[in-house]
Image: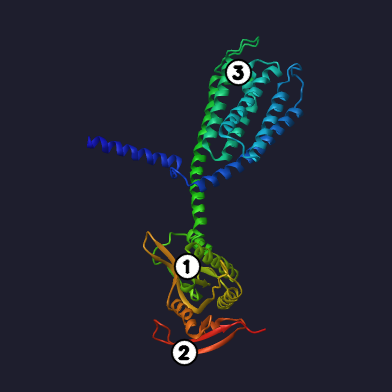
Amino acid sequence: MIELSARAVHRCLMANRLSAFIFGEPVADRLPARVRERIAAQQQQSEKLISWVQMALVLLFAGLWLAAPKAGMNPDVELVPYALGFYFVFTSVRLIGAYRNALTRPFLMISVVIDMALLMILIWSFHIQYMQPASFYLKAPTLMYVFIFIGLRTLRFEPGYIVLAGGSAAVGWLALMVYAIHSNTEYAPMLTRDYVVYMTSNAILIGAEIDKVVSILMVTGVLAIAVLRAQRSLYRAITESTAAQDLTRFVSKEVAARITGADEAIEPGDGESKVASILFTDIEGFSTISESMSPQELASTINAYFQAVGEVIARHGGVILLFEGDAMLITFNAVSPSENHATRALDCALDLQRLCDTRTFGDGVRLPTRCGVNTGPVTVGALGTAESLTFTVLGDNVNIAARLEQLNKQYGTYVMCTQETVNACRGAYQFDFKGEITVKGRASACQVFAVAAPED
């Protein structure tokens, strides 16, 4: 029993490998609703394109029929105009439905069958129009349009419609062949095995007609497999794209782009050294302010604050790497390139100060914000385990910026920076030298400045 079970498992694994080799790696059994919505939207756009191509084909058929000489045709039989007229009306309805997103799956399946049925009826009518035996239509080059209709179904990226189109075409051609063989008209068809006789007369070569059916089925199969493989790749791409968009709601778009655009998967410890400017912010007395608020009021107030300051930060080219309570870690030239990053960091800090001095959040709450800015070499990279990573900046210069933000409380200031930032910045500011201060966690002292915007 164990041996039989092992063989069954082995066969199952082999079947799965073969399926993946032919059809591509399968996607998740159940795609998230938002992914299905994006796929459905793309399919709706495809249906519009398909409808326009079909309309172009109708007009092409009509143009070719009008341009074709009418000599030798039966004047009492005019099936082509009626068929083209019906197809034009049907395609117009389909086009309107595509733009109204009203095309249901049953309607689309029926439309595929109708496409092929109309084409086969047109081909069948040729022997009546030209007053020839039924075998006459088997040599009509109009058969080539079958492959156009099959190829048209690839635009929707659903192999089922391709198989339905190819299957309908194969059944239709077999029906035409059988009708020609058993036709009881005065032009009794002749079966032959001679290829020359077949090509130079109305004789029927069974093998040639079977070749056409096989060609239809082979093209259908190849296209269906190709589309299924592409469909699975598309679904994975849309899933990953949706995940990347969702990721930007939790991390900055610059970090998300760096993660999703990496040539190789980011591993713990991957990082690089850069000269950057670091800005730390923290709301003054936020713990006291939040004590008087309900959880809903607190969430509404802090969200309004983050929305407003986020716009200021984005305007100056800053990248928010970390939210910690009401505090933020913002980088300039660490994740994405930023010229004059020290100037941008100080401009951003001063604009944040102005914003918080002049605006209230939530139910009229003022949130004065303190900032610490430092410039110097930092390490930008990923930390954590193989299963859980965080993208951040590390180094002594990051710690100094954090300590400067806290030092504002001691001096009653709102923006402080180091000598390195002063040296690197190119803007006009008022710097107030506070001395060489040994910030918490460091043995050596820093030259520290309070920063203010120049007076008008």
Tag 3 residue? 197
Q: Secondary structure at mark 1?
A: strand
C-alpha gap between disc 2 and disc 3: 106 Å
- Residue 396: horizontal and vertical position, in percent? 43, 78
Give the residue type that dot 2 points to.
Glu
The label number, if any, that marks residue 436 in the structure image = 2
Q: Quadrant of residue 47?
A: top right
Taking the image as shown, residue 62 lies to the left or right of residue 300, namely right
- Give the mark, 1 or 2, whose residue is nearer the N terminus: 1
- Give the mark, 1 or 3, whose residue is nearer the N terminus: 3
The quarter in which the N terminus is drawn is: top left
Give the residue type that dot 1 points to.
Phe
Give the residue type that dot 3 points to.
Val
- Residue 219: horizontal and vertical position, in percent? 54, 33
Instruction: Using the rendered image of the protein, determine whether residue 136 is visible from the camera's viewpoint.
Output: yes
Does 258 appear above or below 219?
below
C-alpha gap between disc 1 and disc 3: 84 Å
Q: Secondary structure at mark 2?
A: strand
Using a 10 Å C-alpha cutoff, classify the residue at mark 1 as few (fewer than 14 neighbours), some (14 to 19) or many (20 or more).
some
Foreground residue among 83 and 323: 323
- Give the mark, 2 or 3, whose residue is nearer the N terminus: 3
